[in-house]
Image (cartoon, coloured by chain):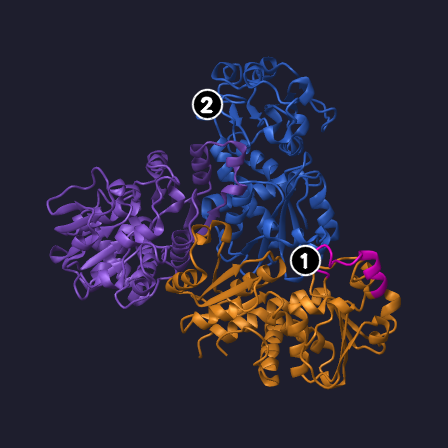
Chain colours: A blue, B purple, C orange
Amino acid sequence: MRHLLTLENLDRAAINRLLDRAERFRSEGAPRHLLAGRTVLTLFFEPSTRTRTSFVLAAKRLGADNVNFDLSRSSASKGESLLDTLHTLEAMHLDALVVRHNENGMPAYLAEHANTGVAVINAGDGTHAHPTQGLLDALTIRQRRPDFANLRVVICGDIRHSRVARSDVRALATLGVRDLRLCAPRAMLPESLADFPGCERTEDFDAALAGADVVIMLRIQKERMLDAQFPDPADYHAHYGLTAGRLALAAGDCQVLHPGPINRGIEIAAEVADGPQSRILDQVANGVVVRMAVLAELLAKPA
Amino acid sequence: MRHLLTLENLDRAAINRLLDRAERFRSEGAPRHLLAGRTVLTLFFEPSTRTRTSFVLAAKRLGADNVNFDLSRSSASKGESLLDTLHTLEAMHLDALVVRHNENGMPAYLAEHANTGVAVINAGDGTHAHPTQGLLDALTIRQRRPDFANLRVVICGDIRHSRVARSDVRALATLGVRDLRLCAPRAMLPESLADFPGCERTEDFDAALAGADVVIMLRIQKERMLDAQFPDPADYHAHYGLTAGRLALAAGDCQVLHPGPINRGIEIAAEVADGPQSRILDQVANGVVVRMAVLAELLAKPA
Amino acid sequence: MRHLLTLENLDRAAINRLLDRAERFRSEGAPRHLLAGRTVLTLFFEPSTRTRTSFVLAAKRLGADNVNFDLSRSSASKGESLLDTLHTLEAMHLDALVVRHNENGMPAYLAEHANTGVAVINAGDGTHAHPTQGLLDALTIRQRRPDFANLRVVICGDIRHSRVARSDVRALATLGVRDLRLCAPRAMLPESLADFPGCERTEDFDAALAGADVVIMLRIQKERMLDAQFPDPADYHAHYGLTAGRLALAAGDCQVLHPGPINRGIEIAAEVADGPQSRILDQVANGVVVRMAVLAELLAKPA
């Protein structure tokens, strides 16, 4: 494992190894000197609170140096190409480049051109992939239900445009989930996405929820939609909002996940987001240790 | 002491304990590992050079990890509520949140909703309070004159809109000052502020200065005033500017304080700001060690 | 050596001592605690990727605390003077101030007013000087050709407006270069610049390249030129672009340098920038260790 660009090429053992490592960081604390002297550069072309801060904390807690590449001050304003920027940063002795970009495939493009010794970590690219989110969601679910083969999982929201959904589907399939329901209004259902037996598409949220063990709600991303595409919030909530009443259709111990930031009263009711079945803040906490595990896996020198 | 929101609930012993600790950091240097592994997040909704940099240095010099929450890049642009941001950051295992906000009471609101184990430090909220400024001003005065009960103190400027003045008055009253003169043009005098016997209001700066041991000049805050409220600078200087001539009305060893940044030639003459009685740069230096003391008090694990 | 403002006052021994130290950092790695407890503040009034990141990494790799002074959030927006900002930062116990400014002489102005114990490092001021660039270019050349007295060096581009050229000329002259050709279209040739026997000016790039051992290409700085001054890119490339064909006029082992970011296809052809004679990425790598050497020289306490 040299880069982390998608979850497509990680098998079940590889994913579980990362999740086990994350769990150890969570229970035993961070080995503060594991990455001492290593440099992690965060390069975000889209706004982010959680993901960037989570990676920065992960790097610092393992003792790595972190530098944030501030685009507003960068040579991007001088017309430098992205590859020249990459090679310049590499020449400063970079160990990992954490990159978020609004274009699909940009992290893979950088990885393809990166020098040996530089790990590229995809922190979300367009509608393509968000592999650390997939991992942290898997970790969150596994903490309560490690029996993935028995789980009924629902993903609901703008699946078509969601890199989170793509990485979640991949992680869940690899970990053995056999009953996965992708639920969205027609315009937000993907044309194709990780087809496997037991993966269904539906527009009927109530039906999808029946007996669910996990429901992953997606954020309505106003900032990614044209106005014409954006649904009426009240109408969306009526059909696809996760309310307490609707959650009662699922299994009694159904876990509720959401990648955040949440739109209260649109895709999720406040009482559910703040309720006992919500794992939303656990996801955030798991995000830091999962990113520590990824950095440790990619950067730590063999003993 | 779990948070530091105002100085209202700190008694004289508590304030002196913080100031003593700050003095020890100043004379003995920082114990670089006191807060190793702790995370201090700075969250500023208003521009600041001094206060933010001062807190960042205080955190780093005690070995804490610091992450600056960059609002322009944050999920605030995605419409996330402040409380959801708080809880998200907490879930990443935050130890202290240093917050500046233009609305009175916002740090207290965050503290009220913060998890156990997260200390909220008010770095200035609206016109309400700026407790670390109150502490560093008290420390600065105490270094030369620990006999607060004997001091005649003048605060001059836009007291009505000044959180610095509010925190200074509170600190001085708690430390035993019995002769305090609040001086401003009528529009800038507060209607009520920490009334205690010996606290007077006046519009006459020359009279207020007679025999003063300490004079705290406030910044004319152009950025907080409507144009119509803002006085003519020359006129303001004529009546309320601290010139060398005016300073001669005070005691010979009168200390001159100003929270900065100063408006030279408006509220304070350059010759006074740069003169031998000025403690302005001492205040800045004291600011770092006072913030170290506050972080140490709130975050250090008992031995 | 208290500040680093230009290379004018460094003799050959002083430059070589810095370059030797940089080489040791490169080969032996950074002594991570050399500057522990020291504070390096980066203060950039112009955009920069390479230089700022390079200084930040240099500071961190020697164990110094780094704080970036973010101008958009600073008291500059409150009208504070630059000197008051300087003295405020100094009072927070600053050890080095790394400053880039668009006005010639601003770092020297700050150095003149800085307290004892604060080192000012010029990270580029206007068209005046960029001393660490001069040092890193000298180091890069020296790695392959330490015999400066035998070298034929060409500098080509907008020499008139280039602080890089000024610092390069100074470094090369001090290190003993006796054959230096400054090549540019007439409007970009300096009226006077480090005249010494063997320093020639020419508008003929092909003639200048004949037998050259080193060619330093300068960036066409669109952001510094009026539209009327800016040459037609194709025309500029035809006369002053370094192509493979043109490079063949130089010595077979001629080193190609460029301070970056490069404008591919304008002052340098992609095949040359990426070719075997290019030292561009070596320059970047050398930039970090040169800045470490400068920080170590200015800040490290005597043993």
Q: Quadrant of the C terminus of chain A?
A: bottom right
Does B244 sit above or below residue B90?
A: below
Going by the numbered disc 2, the residue's amino acid type is Ala
Q: Nearer the viewer, residue B285 or B193?
A: B193
**Marks 2 and 1, the one that precedes in the sequence:** 1
- Measured from the top left, where is residue A280 in percent x and y? 49, 31
Tell whether position A156 is magenta: no
On screen, residue A183 versus residue B294, left or right, reads right
Q: Secondary structure at mark 2?
A: helix
Crowding around mark 1 (Cα neighbors within 10 Å: few <14, some 14 to 19, many 20+) is: some
Q: Do the residues under discs 2 and 1 have CB atoms within 8 angstroms?
A: no
In the displayed structure, B185 sits above or below B211; it is above
Q: Residue at x 56, y 69 (%)?
A: C292
Position in image of residue A196 (x %, y %): 72, 26
Nearer to me, C8 or B267: B267
Kind of residue at disc 1: Gly
Q: Which residue is mark 2?
A: A270
On residue A117, the disc is: 1
Please state the chain letter of the residue tagged with numbered disc 1 in the rendered image. Answer: A
10 Å crowding of disc 2: few (<14), some (14-19), many (20+): some
Q: Which residues are magenta?
A: C220-239
Residue C29 makes an appearance in the image? no
Residue A284 placement (x, y as % from top left): 50, 37
- Identify the residue at horizontal 46%, vertical 50% (top origin): C77
